[in-house]
Amino acid sequence: MTWTGPPDDDQPDVTPGDEVAGATHRFAVYSVVLGIGAFAALYVFPFGCLVLGVPSITTGVHARREIAASKGELTGDSAAVIGLTIGGAALVTGLLSYLLGASSRL
């Protein structure tokens, strides 16, 4: 028995035909986190829906453009859409609550 050296762990265990999923775009994750923060801010600091909602939408749009341009290397399009939706809903909710609150004070 001869020693052949340590096993080569640098190569992944991928056989031909296996598809390796691309990395999730970090801006897609940021979009979801900022969107959730925007909704939470509505109850604590209503101006926070603007402060966190707009970046949620812009990072979601940016992520979707880069994911589409990567041709399969990056994933996370659904997360970007979720972040866009949550951020947009937080903005609309904040705007409506402001407008309804302003109209009731008249």
Image (cartoon, rainbow, N blue to C red):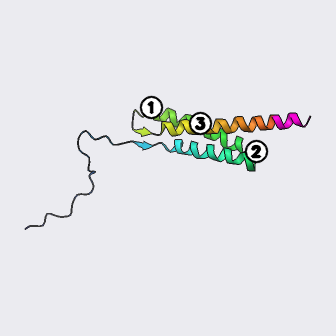
Mark identifier at residue 79: none
Q: Residue at x 26, y 46 (%)?
A: 14
| Dots 3, 1 in contact, CB < 8 A | no
The numbered mark at residue 46 is 2
Q: Give the spatial CA distance, label 1 vs label 2.
A: 36 Å
Earlier sequence position, callout 2 versus callout 3: 2
Q: Quadrant of the N terminus?
A: bottom left
Specify whether 1 is left or right of 46: left
Question: Where is residue 84 drawn, in percent x and y?
Answer: 59, 36
- N-term mark: 3 or 1: 1
Q: Given the image, on which type of amino acid does mark 2 rest?
A: Pro
Q: Residue furthest right?
A: 106
- Callout 2: helix, strand or loop? loop
Alpha carbons under labels 2 and 3: distance apart: 19 Å
What amino acid type should be assigned to the residue bearing mark 1? Ala
Mark 3 is surrounded, within 10 Å at the Cα level, by few (under 14), some (14 to 19) or many (20 or more) other residues, namely many
Residue in the image at 23% along x and 41% along y = 16
| Residue positioned 70% across, 37% down in the render | 91
Q: Residues within 10 Å of mark 1 (few under 14, many from 20)?
A: few
Question: In x, y percent, where is residue 90?
Answer: 68, 39
Q: Which residue is mark 3?
A: 84
Q: Circle 1 sits in a helix, a strand or a loop, which is it? A: helix
Which residue is most to the left?
1
Please give the range of residues in magenta.
Answer: 100-106
| Residue linked to disc 1 | 69
Q: Secondary structure at mark 3?
A: helix
Q: Main secondary structure of the magenta part?
A: helix
Kind of residue sitting beneath label 3: Leu
Using the numbered discs, state the Cα–Cα distance from disc 3 to disc 1 in whole angstroms: 18 Å
Location of the C terminus (image quadrant): top right
